Amino acid sequence: MNEKFLTDILNKISVSGCEGPVQDIVKSCMKDCADIIQQDEIGDLICILNPESSTKIMLSAHADEIGAIISNITEKGRLQVVNRGGIIPFTYPGQQVQICTEHGIVYGAVEARRELFENKELAAKDFLIDIGADTKEEALTQVSLGDAVTLDTQIRPMINGRFTARALDDRLGVFIIMEALRRAKEKGCAAGVYAAATVGEETTKNGACWCSSRINPSLAVIVDVTYCSDYGDKETPEAGTVRLGGGPVLCNSPTVTRNLNRKMEECAKKINISIQTEAASGLTYTDGDKIHFTNQGIPIVLVSIPLRYMHTPAEVADKKDVKDCIELIAEFLCQYS
């Protein structure tokens, strides 16, 4: 597993609508492997293997993360923000943040006041971010309206092959689809593979729609994260039991093609990888929900990475699950020509 590639992706800021820094890393790391690399007007990045093949398999994972963007600056130099995606507001007060500006990273802190912790309706609009400026004019020399804001977190190894970081959702997926393309190439894959690091999943899913409409794939493999049920007192009657380290997760959903699930199961058995299963009563709440309905309809299969503490500053994943997802998808791709 190319841990430097993964670490470089996770170290960047990629708030929805501001995914450029992550896409630059992907482009640099895949230039020695992909036959063609394309980037569209909204920032989607597609790495292509075997473009001459009539079989087009789209791999999709979203490059964006939840966060905030600067919406206003007060006369006292405090930054005000609006959320981008499903942040958990109570994880922000009293925390350090980093702001991605045109000239580099600016650091700050979210004001922590007792009334914020007592506000049961706390939202991003209630935040005031202190970057050390005393006036609006001074703040504007450092940041601009529209700059992306995330919590200032770190990547840390844990025991038993686990690790924790911000925004594993879904930059882990981007890493997996790119490494699966690389691994499929090593295994002699003959099918056309279109690995799309999409933008905007956490907000509009516009990237998935654009990529699928333009690729017009024969089928699509979506890679995203899913909730583990192995912590706290989480109940599992609706989705099922998902364990960290238990392997890739397939989804029984009305939008997921059953035959593709079976093909994934056969591939897992062939290469001796354990898989898990979850259920969805309707939509999957992934890029697959847009891709499935593009063009004349696209058959999809969803491969999910078990994740603890989704949308918090300390998401937790297992390296074995990541490696198994890469190998499973690579084997699946090699079944097509």
Image (tube, grey):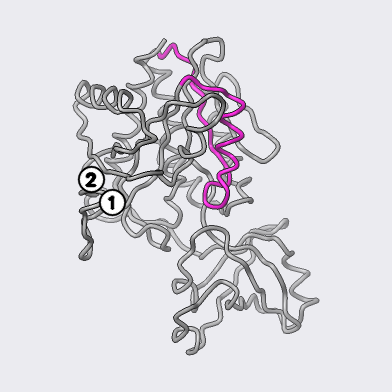
How crowded is the residue under tag 2: few (<14 C-alpha within 10 Å), some, or many (20+)? many
Q: Is residue 168 left or right of residue 65?
A: left
| Relative image position of residue 143 (x, y in whole percent) | 72, 66
Q: Residue at x 20, y 53 (%)?
A: 237
Q: Secondary structure at mark 2?
A: loop
How crowded is the residue under tag 1: few (<14 C-alpha within 10 Å), some, or many (20+)? some
Q: Secondary structure at mark 1?
A: strand
State if disc 1 and disc 2 touch (CB < 8 Å): yes
Amino acid type of the residue tagged 1 in the rendering: Arg
Amino acid type of the residue tagged 2 in the rendering: Gly
Q: Residue at x 51, y 34 (%)?
A: 291
State the quadrant of the C terminus. top left
Compared to residue 144, the image places residue 332 above or below, namely above
| Relative image position of residue 119 (x, y in whole percent) | 47, 84
- Residue bounds of the magenta highlight: 189-218
Tell whether position 204 is magenta: yes
Q: Residue at x 31, y 52 (%)?
A: 227
Q: Residue at x 65, y 40 (%)?
A: 43
Tell whether position 160 is magenta: no
Q: Which mark is residue 162?
A: 1
Q: Which mark is residue 245?
A: 2
Compared to residue 116, the image places residue 2 above or below, namely above
